[in-house]
Amino acid sequence: MPIATPEVYNEMLDRAKAGKFAYPAINVTSSQTLHAALRGFAEAESDGIVQISTGGAEFLGGQHSKDMVTGAVALAEFAHIVAEKYDVNIALHTDHCPKDKLDGYVRPLLAVSEERVKAGRNPLFQSHMWDGSAETLADNLSIAQELLERARAAKIILEVEITPTGGEEDGVSHEINDSLYTTVDDAVRTAEALGLGDKGRYLLAASFGNVHGVYKPGNVVLRPELLKELNEGVAAKYGKPAGSQPFDFVFHGGSGSSPEEILTALENGVVKMNIDTDTQYAFTRPVADHMFRNYDGVLKVDGEVGNKKTYDPRTWGKLAEASMSARVVEACQNLRSNGTRLK
């Protein structure tokens, strides 16, 4: 199947919300990690989301120029071709983009999709993220309004992060403290500024103690039940029925989360969960194992010639792809998206 159309992507998110499951959003940095993600989704019989961060896009742009737009566009075009060989629907997304990188990343990518849509084609990416968590909420939402209007016109969904996620990702960092919890007032102000779908669809990365990076279970105090409070507060404000869930939530910083915490998040409206740290490790672990086991083969030790079959990147690359794809399957199982692909 091809990359999801705007209509299919909306249907994917609607089905996740109704079915109380979420799609893993897998960060990729190469054609190989892209294939690992696609393979994992296909093996899990799950539709999914593949995303590129600013750092990932810079890496994809090559170390000569480090151009983020070139890197993101190149991998997206590649994905549009290779995804047709996998029997799942895949949405392309750009991950965390702070204010100082908007003009070098999201805005140019929106322009690419605007031109495609004007020409009668689908957008290149299906969603983009604006990370204004380092700004005041007023400034954050003001920029979000501008981006949401452009995204809507280009048939793209916007993701917004209104309050900080702890830890560090691609140079954006926040302390781990009590500010990592979105309030009902924050949620109401978001709905007032961005609407509830009437001004364009958006995904909301609210904070409930989330922290980027590597943490063992118990080291981060997550409160996914807070998402229910946010939905209830906004539903009451706008006269929505009791139990309704106005927001499509995104779960950031989920490494080390317990199954119970994930389940609670799903029940309270999470439709997308970012997976990066765990898949990075899954990709690298078998490569390290291969190098240690074949030290004399991958290196020309003491003037020897080594073993081409062991240092051929395809040899260890296949191991890395298989390991990462298995971790994607696990993510689909944890988020209950396995076996839910659109036929």
Image (cartoon, rainbow, N blue to C red):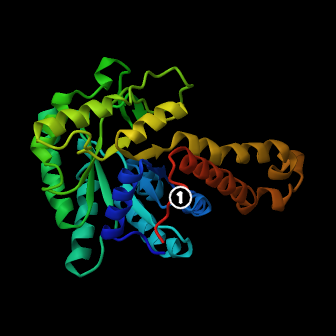
Residue visible at 23% across and 75% down in the picture: 117
Q: Which residue is mark 1?
A: 30
Q: Position of residue 122 (x, y in %)?
A: 30, 74
Q: Position of residue 7 (x, y in %)?
A: 31, 69
136 relative position to 86: left or right: left
Q: Residue furthest bottom?
A: 120
> Quarter-wise, where is residue 119 in the image?
bottom left
Q: Which residue type does callout 1 highlight? A: Ser
Q: Establish if 27 lies above or below 341.
A: above
Examine the rendering and report whether any part of residue 96 can be seen: yes
53 relative position to 150: left or right: right
278 relative position to 317: left or right: left
Residue visible at 31% across and 68% down in the picture: 6
Q: Nearer the viewer, residue 33 or 185?
A: 185
Secondary-structure class at tag 1: loop
Q: Residues within 10 Å of mark 1 (few under 14, many from 20)?
A: some
Q: Establish if 204 lies above or below 167.
A: below
Q: Establish if 82 lies above or below 106.
A: below
Q: Position of residue 315 (x, y in %)?
A: 76, 60
Give the total of numbered labels: 1
Q: Position of residue 238 (x, y in %)?
A: 11, 41
